Image (cartoon, coloured by chain):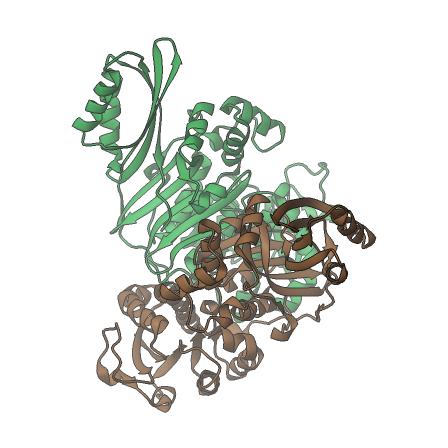
Chain colours: A green, B brown
Amino acid sequence: MNVYVGLLGCGTVGQGVVNLTQKRAGIIADMTGYRPVVKRVLVRDLAKRRDVDLNSEVFTRDADVVLADPEIQVIVETMGGIEPARTYILAALRRGKHVVTANKDLIALHGVEILETARDAGVDILFEASVGGAIPLIGPLQDNLTANEVTDLKGIINGTTNYILTQMTETGMDFAQALAEAQELGYAEANPASDVDGLDAARKLVILASIAFHAHVRLDEVRVEGIRTVTAQDVAYAKELGTVVKLVASGSDRGGKLSLSVRPTLIPQGHPLAHVSGSYNALFVRGDAAGDLMFFGRGAGSLPTASAVMGDVISLLRNMRLGVTSSRNHRLVLDKQVQMDDSEPLRHYLRMSVSDQPGVFAEIARLFAVAGISMETVLQKRVTAGTAEIVVVTHEIPVEVMNETIDRLRTSSHVQQVHCVMPVEALAE
Amino acid sequence: MNVYVGLLGCGTVGQGVVNLTQKRAGIIADMTGYRPVVKRVLVRDLAKRRDVDLNSEVFTRDADVVLADPEIQVIVETMGGIEPARTYILAALRRGKHVVTANKDLIALHGVEILETARDAGVDILFEASVGGAIPLIGPLQDNLTANEVTDLKGIINGTTNYILTQMTETGMDFAQALAEAQELGYAEANPASDVDGLDAARKLVILASIAFHAHVRLDEVRVEGIRTVTAQDVAYAKELGTVVKLVASGSDRGGKLSLSVRPTLIPQGHPLAHVSGSYNALFVRGDAAGDLMFFGRGAGSLPTASAVMGDVISLLRNMRLGVTSSRNHRLVLDKQVQMDDSEPLRHYLRMSVSDQPGVFAEIARLFAVAGISMETVLQKRVTAGTAEIVVVTHEIPVEVMNETIDRLRTSSHVQQVHCVMPVEALAE
């Protein structure tokens, strides 16, 4: 029996969905009893060449042609962005159509509204593809790990920044150069702000943290710092310290108090996240029962993202066969507060330029001692006549104490500049 | 509303299940609408001290007390072994009880019978905990990745051997020494055969391959080789070659022809499996759409395994709430043949002792050339007067060609012994 699918958007991911649907229709029919058929595709430009084998009448510029078609039971949204995607999805849900979406921005910002609309309408909304591309993340967090209290999430969930940082690590090139190369290769957009400033990772973190911690998490509750301040020198020092710089989206739950951040972070070589290179993504999860877990794979791309979309479509078809929707399950939202007070203790990496004269190091050591910060490692190098560079790795201290100390360092007459401050991840258990 | 659980076996994992059920009962009730309560526990020895907070009347030595209790709707089996677990589980299913099991041996050897019995009875049988401990593997393969044609599975799915090989790699100790240490620490059993000879990994591979490839796979279709032949020298040469020795459970699907093996294997440092150390487990999966994925975590232990069991229990409770069972889903078994003919081309590592005299290397090179095998790397070292050791890494050749060549090497008057042959994994994409 055919189940008709309406597709909103036919870019890279949408084309992957069309191709994968056609390639696997027979086996999906054997598996679920339903054969998915793409009946309508909403596009902006009818004339554009697309790498799909569909009749030209399937394409339309009119959203209503897709959304109002009573034969279409499943809407797949791969257009991205907030509007008009939000309006279309809400309309589809209200008309009783199930929706699968790959739209991280929409779920991160309007997830609650969309989930509630789906529940009220008695239909499914699935969004595995919105985070981590092909990597199953939402499924495992929502199903397999639900007996756990998840205490920590650490994700490398932005491929563009991971590609840039990997290039910097492997070749010694600086940020600007690595970015330019990534843009040339299509791994970074012409306007790379959303990726390199950490916003894309923050949106994905909102989705993952909401599910893992059973809480409503808002984007403005995530401390976000991008990778523009990371220099080739920092990357080289990180290597000397037996670590590697990664943009880490981090969430922790300490007895119901959440801390959420996206920051460039030093990961020790023995940590499983240290080996997640290039455009790969990974999520590290610590549960009170499961211990440490990691999920690794392709975080973007046409077929990897389509793979996740189609996994959701197959779940939908199975639900339809059983006459149920996942949204009829109880959902749990616990009353958890997000802490923005920087009280979480972390090890810190700190690079600064100081005047190269006797007594300077003693003065800096005194400033650390006064704040109660003990140093784990210190590297000191002469850079030019009159200027030395000092790199310090501290033991665990709260971010707020570190920040106060940095302010004090900045006012010291011996310190020329504090260049870069990054947390240093502990080893996995 | 309470849902009563009967537990079969109360060893390490069973105790974890009891503790986790009690700790999380409230939140599971909020999540699913049902509060799981352990009502009966089948044990062999009533007097044994157990680290659980249960009334003594809960324990029984009589399986019928558990299986015939009409209030018990869910049976959790953590006793292990084939009998009497098989008889108990079949009886429970036939009485309309849902079953969650952590029993890899049973599912690997009698999975078909058990799944069919569950389907006929209209109840669920879930077994995520049977492979990979806390790591979600069966869920992702059965749900998220179903739109993929999975072409390759590579698993480090036996913690004991991984601990032993990691110790050998890190300290240079030999197999016997590392095994003795693992036994002392409780990571290896007094009779370690099932682990070190690869049988445990082979059973888990049968389960994973059946699901990933949608095929009936039998244990006798897996080529199994353990790690007893791996010496400290091999581990050292592996390091020199930029690789690390792991016991890899490997399955591949080439157009419907399956190859299955468990063998010590050289993994290059750039491969995500190379960094899976100690008692951790991991499964590497390649799908035609998803690309390369890896799932990593604790493969054994009380709470990690209980975490997976409880994930299944929660799925069950959700299904009960929706009035469905997963076993009502269509299941797909494709007609696939397992190849035992060793035609899969692999790179090979080969270590042999030869007489240390002019012309010997030329003779060996000739034997390789005759078989059409080209060598990628050759290491030659003088070991003692009169004997040199040669290590060869070949380009990709079918196992059968390698084996013929080894036979020919063994009959050569210059070759004293062929010590160790292992496949060498290619880098991930």
Q: Is residue B387 above or below residue B39?
A: above
Foreground: B251 or B318? B251
The quarter holding residue B224 reads bottom right
Measuring from the top left, give residue A381's x and y in whole percent.
Answer: 37, 19
- Point 44% across, 30% down: residue: A197
- Point 53% across, 67% down: residue: B201
Q: Residue furthest front?
A: B385
* Residue A1 seen in render: no
The reply, left or right, for residue A324 in relation to residue B335 is: left
The reply, left or right, for residue B119 in relation to residue A52 is: left
* Residue B173 seen in render: yes
Q: Quadrant of the C terminus of chain B?
A: top right
Q: How many marks?
A: 0
Q: Residue furthest left?
A: A370
Q: Residue furthest top?
A: A385
Q: Quadrant of the N terminus of chain B?
A: bottom left
Q: Is residue B123 above or below residue A106?
A: below
Measuring from the top left, give residue A366's x and y in whole percent.
Answer: 19, 23
